[in-house]
Amino acid sequence: MPIITITTDLGLKDGYIASVKGTILSQLENVNVVDITHNIQPFNIYEAAYILKNCYKDFPIGTIHIIGVDDEISFNNEHLAVKANGHFFIGADNGLFSLLFDDLQPEKIVRLNISQSSDCTTFAIKNIFATAACHIARGGTLEIIGSEIKKFDVIKQSLNAVYTNRILKGIIIYIDHYGNAISNIKKQEFIKYDSGNGFSIFFGREDEIIKNISSKYKDVSISEKLAIFGESNLLQIAINQGNASKLLGLRIHETIRIEFK
């Protein structure tokens, strides 16, 4: 049975997601539709790319991923279907794909040319993306629904940590459901620059300091802060059974600095 995932910024209050699912099921009865999240901050392609990048590989090869974030079509925001790493991705060429595949070369990219039956041009995820996903799920090729292009038109730069003078400086890129503040500092970067002589992690108002990396949240007492590399292998600041974002005043784009001895 084919799998179609949906990631959007549409929220759950309204009936938009139900309409998208109904459209998919009307075209393809035997399909497994999986919600990744519909709580992306409106138009936040960085957040959408982070979430999808860290979970799509857990799905079987051949899974089709619909991305409905800032998807209204325009001259500078065209619709694409992309095959990469054995998966299919459908969304707008608004910079999200360049973030999602910053370290991976897609196998094929097509610009969608699907004609929609509705006059509404503001609901692409239902009127275009769902149809494209069902076509692929039935075994259809990308060439039937689009014209091949070589690269994305809209390129966004990934936010990478910077290392100078034994200081690794990054920023908070995501706050999860528990209030954990996840940075763009990668575990492999930390290992590369750590000499084993100790380090200090500064964050918040820079009067907050952590001097070790925990292997699990319960390494510290309840309500104590910690630094840990999570499932995504990105450094995060957390509080055991607490909300680090609220209690430590951590926000998106704030600096996290590691000083190595």
Image (tube, helix red, strand yellow):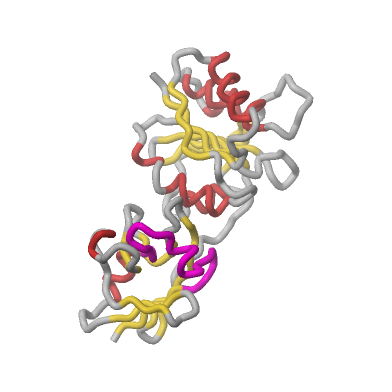
Q: Quick one: which residue is furthest to the right in this view?
A: 119
x and y percentages locating residue 47 in the rendered image: 53, 52
**Frontmost residue, 96 versus 242:** 242
Question: Position of 140 compared to 13: left or right?
Answer: left
x and y percentages locating residue 238 in the rendered image: 37, 63
Q: Residue at x 30, y 62 (%)?
A: 222
x and y percentages locating residue 115 in the rendered image: 70, 24
Q: Residue at x 44, y 82 (%)?
A: 207
**Frontmost residue, 247 versus 192:** 247
Q: Is residue 247 magenta?
A: yes
x and y percentages locating residue 241 in the rendered image: 35, 57
Question: Position of 139 compared to 192: left or right?
Answer: right
Q: Quick one: which residue is furthest to the front in this view?
A: 222
- For the N terminus, which image quadrant? top left
Name above or below for residue 34 compared with residue 249.
above
Q: Is residue 236 magenta?
A: yes
Q: Residue at x 23, y 63 (%)?
A: 219
- For the C terminus, which image quadrant? bottom left
Q: Which residues are magenta?
A: 235-255
Q: Count the marks.
A: 0
Q: Quadrant of residue 13?
A: top right
Question: Position of 131 compared to 65: left or right?
Answer: right
Q: Residue at x 57, y 39 (%)?
A: 8
Q: Quick one: which residue is furthest to the left in this view?
A: 196
Question: Position of 13 compared to 102: left or right?
Answer: right
Q: Quadrant of residue 128?
A: top right
